[in-house]
Image: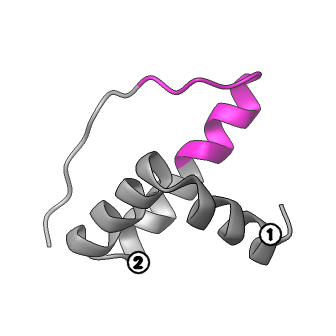
């Protein structure tokens, strides 16, 4: 699989928080397929109940 570089803008309180977000997103992108990642994004954007349940499950 080839690698691609992007420039992104991340909203965060601090630069350290932004860096942690990018690392987390990179980990998700590396472990999930395009379909899985797209479905996850759809749930986060459009299903607040499932998103809240996931946060409870993750204890965050």
Q: Are marks 1 and 2 in contact (CB under 8 Å)?
A: no
SS class, disc 2: helix
Q: Quadrant of the N terminus?
A: bottom left
Q: In this view, does 48 lie above or below 13?
A: below
Between the residue at mark 1 and the residue at mark 2, the CA separation in whole angstroms equals 22 Å
Q: In the image, residue 11 lies at what x, y percent?
A: 58, 23
Q: In this view, does 29 lie above or below 23?
A: below
SS class, disc 1: helix
The residue at 76%/22% (across/down) is 13
Range of residues picked out in magenta: 9-22
> What residue would you read off at disc 1?
56
- The verdict on residue 19 being magenta is yes
Q: In the image, residue 47 lies at what x, y percent?
A: 49, 56
Number of residues whose C-alpha sits closer than 10 Å to that of mark 2, classed few (under 14), some (14–19) or many (20 or more): few
Q: Which mark is residue 25?
A: none
Q: Residue 31 carries which label?
A: 2
Q: In the image, residue 15 lies at what x, y percent?
A: 70, 24
Q: Is residue 36 above or below residue 27?
A: below
The residue at 61%/61% (across/down) is 49
Q: Which of 37 and 47 is in front in this view?
A: 47
- Left-right relation of 60 to 44: right
């Amino acid at each position: 699989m080839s690698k691609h570089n992007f420039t992104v803008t991340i909203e965060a309180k601090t630069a350290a928080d932004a860096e942690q977000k990018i690392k987390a997103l990179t980990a998700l992108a590396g472990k999930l397929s395009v379909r899985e990642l797209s479905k996850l994004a759809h749930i986060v954007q459009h299903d607040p109940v499932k998103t809240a349940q996931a946060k409870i499950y993750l204890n965050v």
